[in-house]
Image: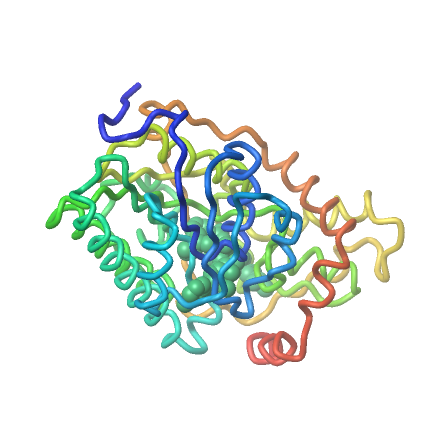
Amino acid sequence: MTFSENSPSSKQERRLIVTGGAGFIGANFVHYWCAKYPNDRVIVLDALTYAGNRQTLALLDTHPNFRFVKGDICDRSLVDALIQEEAVDTIVHFAAESHVDRSILGPGAFVQTNVVGTFTLLEAFRQHWLAGDRPSHYRFHHVSTDEVYGSLGSDDPAFSETTPYAPNSPYSASKAGSDHLVRAYHHTYGMPTTMTNCSNNYGPYHFPEKLIPLMCINILLGKPLPVYGDGQNIRDWLYVKDHCSAIDAVLERGVIGETYNVGGNNEVKNIDLVHMLCELMNELAPKLPVRPAQELITFVKDRPGHDRRYAINSTKLQNELGWTPSVTVQEGLRQTVEWYLENEAWWRPLLSEEYQAYYSKVYA
Ligand code: NAD
Ligand code: TYD
């Protein structure tokens, strides 16, 4: 196992800004972190775009070390003030525009938040790090995606950390741009950065536009289940709590300047995944407008530039930092379906007019 000389011991308290902490993975991470490290100071910086939800963090409002700040990561003076006021030593950067279909409809916001926003955070953190005489326990952790590596053929080996970047969508291109900036800030300035590139996450608090929550909610509403193209596209699925523990491992034991791929070893064809969700809903939902739910499956026009297959090799993270995913896709999907069944009060308000307008544009 490799331990970084620059990492603090796990007992040292951190003062973190978590950007995008009101989104899906960020919120799961904040809940995970506040439970595991209650003495750490956790400041969430989130602009509360359509994908951010303050309610997801409501249970933490009584936590003495938690603070929520509504704000944009592109706002340099806000970021500077927050870093200084809170004497921040760690940034865990989740904030992003994250949905491929929205990036096809309007790529501008993706370049702004994902590229300019990451640049703004890096610059602010660099000045703070320099002013403090380059403290060795500081950390900028960047959360990225396997989509920067492009699309695999059916027999290609899984993406490794040395796979060349070949992003195909405006979303993945903007994430690739942010990854390159993070890499350059370490290479050029010696900034204490780490990065994770993770496969598709699923679990609680996932915004309805993404495949798994969309299918769960449409089954409950008796609406068609839109499968793009021939449904044979493959994604690797990771339960979100396993992503949180992977970032924890990298923050605690990761080597400065390194990138770690994170994946679940769960390659599933979209159509098979939709069938699994239908089966779980048939079993677990007391009432369904259409039963069996499989009757709702509808093949629709493919997404432009749709990547065929993602698969990720996370051997480096497993061998060097001792991380392993703990939830199988069968267990994780069951827990996720149960969560959507029990938390209609969370997802129902998200089906807003704005969301319906977006839905009509994509699925018209
Ligand atoms: P999400 O869309 O659910 O949440 C994004 C959050 O960022 C929201 O709370 C939003 O309000 C906030 N945000 C957006 N623009 C902002 C800005 N300019 N300033 C401040 N806050 C802003 O996304 P997610 O699925 O939780 O993804 C989080 C991160 O993980 C992203 O960087 C994404 O690229 C990466 N990632 C996601 C997946 C996945 O399967 N969802 C997989 C790998 C990597
Ligand atoms: P998504 O959740 O959007 O994640 P990503 O595109 O980042 O992998 O989609 C996962 C897969 O599901 C992807 O291959 C596209 C497909 N998909 C559908 O078939 N229908 C849908 O309505 C959605 C949202 C996605």
Q: Is residue 305 above or below residue 36?
A: below
Q: Is residue 246 above or below residue 23?
A: above
Q: Which residue: 21% across, 48% down?
A: 129
Q: Residue furthest top?
A: 1
Q: Residue furthest front?
A: 85
Position of 227 compared to 74: left or right? Answer: right
Residue 136 image-quadrant placement:
top left
Quadrant in which the N terminus is drawn? top left
Q: Nearer the viewer, residue 129 or 187?
A: 129
Q: Is residue 101 above or below residue 260?
A: below
Measured as percent of width and height from the top left, residue 56 is found at: 63, 54
Q: Is residue 164 above or below residue 249?
A: below
Q: Which residue: 36% across, 35% down?
A: 251
User: Is residue 291 at least partly visible in the picture?
Assistant: yes
Position of 315 compared to 265: left or right? Answer: left
Quadrant in which the C terminus is drawn? bottom right
User: Is residue 99 at least partly visible in the picture?
Assistant: no
